Image (cartoon, rainbow, N blue to C red):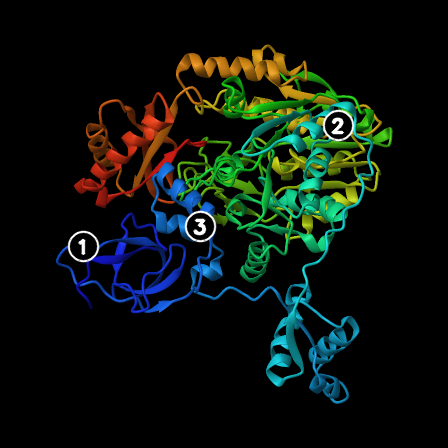
Amino acid sequence: MKLETSCLQVAIFAPLRRIFSYACPASGPLPAGVRVRVPFASGSRIAMVLGMGPCPPGVEVKDIQTVLDSTPILDPALQRLIAFGAAYYQHAIGDVWATALPAALRKGQPLPDIAASYQLSAAGRAALQRVRGKRQRALLDALQTDGMLAPTTLEAGLRPALREAVRRGWAQAVAAPIPALRCSDSPFHLHQEQQAAVAVLRAAEGFSPVLLQGVTGSGKTEVYLETLRPHLEAGGQALVLVPEISLTPQLLDRFAQRFGGEQVAALHSGQSDGERLRTWAAAREGRLRVIIGTRSAVFVPLPRLAMIVVDEEHDPSFKQQTGWHYSARDLAIQRARLEGCPIVLGSATPSLESLHNVDLGRYGTLHLRQRAGGAQAPAIALLPLRRQGLQGGLSGPLLGACAATLAAGNQVLLFLNRRGYAPALLCHDCGHVFHCPRCAAALIWHRRDARLRCHHCGHEERLPRNCPQCGSAALISAGQGTEQLEDVLRERFPDTPIWRVDRDALRGREALENVVREVRRDEPAILVGTQILAKGHHFPAVTLVGIVNTDQGLFSADFRAPERLLQTVLQVAGRAGRAERPGRVLLQTHHPEHPLLQALLQGDYSAPAAALLAERVAAGLPPATALAVLRAEAHQRSRVEAFLQGAAALAPAGLEVSGPLPSLLERRAGFERAELWAQAGTRAVLQRLLSTWLQALEALPQARQVRWQIDVDPLSF
């Protein structure tokens, strides 16, 4: 240990709000962005060097144990993005760094040498005659046939064989050339609006956010491709963010067909740690031109970043809901600002935040009102359910429309955003409802597995034979889920293929791709699914879309519910009539007179969205004001209330605090939950006040008796 005056300031990869000081190594100060292993508590941890700073007075600082990187692992712009993300979302910077890096790098593993390829050595050619191991033989044959192979192109099963071949001297490393970009011309004729949008976006220079609002089926992806082409041909790189893993395969195929498979890669949580690390490192070295990924891809290092695209920018999946509550869309905008490059936000149903920024002149805007290929927007109609007989939640008119659509050789899509057979199981004699013992929610009945499951905490139990309250065997379901819809439809249409698309039915990484491939065979079929079906998919033969429970979002306590209902209905409706065949959309509802549903009949998003935005502004809700939510949970409700009441009392002047309020799900996984709403007129004011407030909260005695976190710009409650 040493007494120092100038120390390394490091952030431990953990949710700790403190920065720690360590002695500089004898070789001199380390640059920010270098990983080190440091002694911490009774062991050691991986940490990130943030820079130099004064040492704590009178303290003997410890030496670091190991320097893991010779140069910063991220460039200065990304380091500034991470610092911004930690400050804006009021989160521990070490945990922010951990989120930004692949798991292997967080654990201290070295960067892989992506630039190295391997060729057969003289010893390897001699070994070809005697090697008998199946994998070693396959590897040596591949090296002899191709001449040179990169580890990333090998099957996972052959990579251990490559390591063994290198150890034996049968394969030798050589510098691999960067694959050439192979651009293909668009197979489509762009309509006038697309051409105009491409021209404007290609001319964009520096930081220039543009909202591309295009109706479903208007060809936004083709606009992205044509806009990015000159940037890629000039040697630049592009980042394309999508909200869901399910959207990456089809987008990856489109980009690979146009720019070559060697230059395009996906990055998402469904990949192995090794696969993510190799893709991340290849992008960092400039060996990939296009990265298509979900939330965490916003942090992928791209040394020649020329443009960012955020597809389906309105989607709440861009907001992380656990740990560090960041918005990938909003950080992408900040990254574009720091990198000085254009960013395109694409959606058929833009978020009210983006529309508000357009109104304020912060974003440019482009419109695609015409569907590609001459397809017409589907007609939307309401199906009133009052006094209607229902079969598994499906009305007679909707079932009749399904039958007519199938008879015409077309396909049907039915949307219900509820998994399982039924959202509740109850006793017909006494009314007892089976609830999760750990959450304030009913258990979902999964009939095929004969299980009751909680979709919040994962608790599950066997289907009971009798009611635990009165002993009756008269147990019945309440409501409908996708599994029940599938059963009803199979009974009604026994000769028609029926595909259920939800997380329960899709097992394995390629399950959704297989379903999409079958549906595109253009034969009569019915798709039943949840939110997975609502966005991005192209089903040419779907001419009828039925939304089974339109009322689900009409009366929520969440002030964003009307916006989400509007977006969901129009996104799902957009799956109909995308080819030359006209489509129609039927909305089942008990409230056909509701103003929002009446507005939906026009099939237009702009007018009702503008009305909702005006309501938000009048009510003083985001995006007109800035909002953060302080959440707390503990096994004892009294501790939660005591902490939040103490927090409310410490709120600085200018911070408008409401609560404590019970969370929409008051108990989850055994924890009682409540929250405070904290509002200010602008984000800048909110940030300044939150920083002061959170420092005071850490000193509260009650803060150590609960789990608490701050969520800036919350999307769920």
- The residue that appears at 33% across and 28% down in the rendered structure is 686
Q: Is residue 679 above or below residue 171?
A: above
Local packing at callout 2 (Cα closer than 10 Å; few below 14, some 14-19, many 20+) is: some
Residue kind at label 3, given as amino acid type = Thr
Q: Which mark is residue 363?
A: none
Q: Quadrant of residue 214?
A: top right
* SS assignment at label 3: helix
Q: Which mark is residue 195?
A: 2
Question: The N terminus is located in which quarter?
Answer: bottom left
Q: Quadrant of residue 565?
A: top right
Residue 100: x and y in percent read 46, 50
Point out the residue furthest to the right here.
408
Local packing at callout 3 (Cα closer than 10 Å; few below 14, some 14-19, many 20+) is: some
- The residue that appears at 65% across and 21% down in the rendered structure is 588
Left or right of 544 on screen, residue 47: left
Q: Quadrant of residue 380?
A: top right
Residue 282: x and y in percent read 59, 58
The residue beneath circle 3 is 99
Q: Which mark is residue 56?
A: 1
Local packing at callout 1 (Cα closer than 10 Å; few below 14, some 14-19, many 20+) is: some
- The residue that appears at 49% across and 40% down in the rendered structure is 335
Residue kind at label 2, given as amino acid type = Gln
Q: How far, Cα to Cα, is label 3 from label 2?
A: 38 Å
Q: Earlier in the sequence, mark 2 or mark 1?
A: 1
199 and 427: which one is in front?
Answer: 199
Left or right of 204 on screen, residue 537: right
